[in-house]
Image (tube, rainbow, N blue to C red):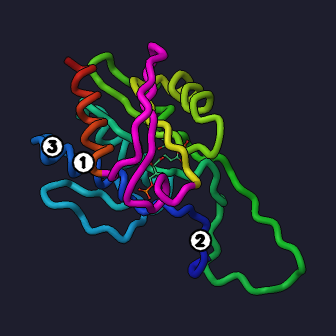
Amino acid sequence: DPVRFISNPSSGKMGFAVATAAENRGAEVVLVAGPTRLFDPANIQTIRVVSAREMAGAVFDHFEAADIIIKTAAVSDYSPPEIADHKIKKGAEEMDIVFQKNIDILRTLGGRKRPDQFLVGFAAETRDLRENACKKLVEKNLDMIVGNLVGNPDSGFSADTNRVTLFYPNREREPLEVMEKTAVANLLLDRILERLS
Ligand code: PMT
């Protein structure tokens, strides 16, 4: 309803760090951002969206022209199909909210990807990081997935630092130490450029 929403604690820090690191290296960057308190980074075309559907539209609009696509966003898998026009009033002891599956933006991109494009996903997991991340890598036809163990204060949602493992289709993997999200972003770009060359 107009005064309440269902979301997650993503701050946008990881995504903005990747966008800024790429811009610093001379890339022309389009940043599609969900709700965050962060300001638009300098020299980056930033498109603000609220819903998964809006994010899908903006990402699809820019996909064809992109060489490298990095999806750090924690997109909701489900959302309520209807938003109440007015505040929902307290009534019965229990209340049900029906959720519908959202479009999986990354999986759609994986199906449309050209051989010259490099597609990177993130996977936020609370357990079985390797198994869950590798499943997404294959199912979404990715060139790399960044497995992100969440649940500790120094990693994942809202933290300034992150602990990630990079996984590749050839089963190679690279676990990284806890480091600033800006450092994760730069290392990620190093690895992508190595693979592209
Ligand atoms: O924003 P921060 O506070 O800095 O936090 C960073 C982060 C924890 C959000 C980030 O590092 C991270 O791990 N992002 C992935 C979050 C996630 O929820 O992943 P997932 O396992 O649900 O999704 C897997 C991949 O599919 C992701 O690349 C996601 O963008 C994509 N996806 C998911 C659902 C959906 N409907 N469409 C998608 O494209």
Residue 61 drawn at (x, y percent): 32, 42
User: Where, quadrant-wise, is the C terminus in this rendering?
Assistant: top left
At horizontal 29% and vertical 44% (from top left) the residue drawn is 185
- Is residue 92 placed above or below 74 in the rendered structure? below
Could you say where residue 29 lies in the image, as x and y percent from the top left?
20, 46
Residue 112 seen in this snapshot: no
Residue type at mark 3: give it. Answer: Glu
Please tell me which of labels 2 and 1 falls first in the chain.
2
Most foreground residue, 7 or 20: 20
Crowding at label 1, few (<14), some or many (≥20) Cα neighbours within 10 Å? some
Amino acid on which the number 1 mark rests in the picture? Val
Image-quadrant location for residue 79? bottom right
Under mark 2, the amino acid is: Phe
- Give x and y (percent) for residue 170: 45, 13
Residue identifier under label 2: 5
Q: Is residue 138 visible?
A: yes
Q: How many other residues sit within 10 Å of disc 3, few (<14), some (14-19) or many (≥20)? A: some
Disc 2 element: loop
Q: Which mark is residue 30?
A: 1
Confirm if mark 3 falls within 8 A of ligand 1: no
Taking the image as shown, residue 174 lies to the left or right of residue 196, namely: right
Q: Find the magenta span and give its range.
A: 152-181
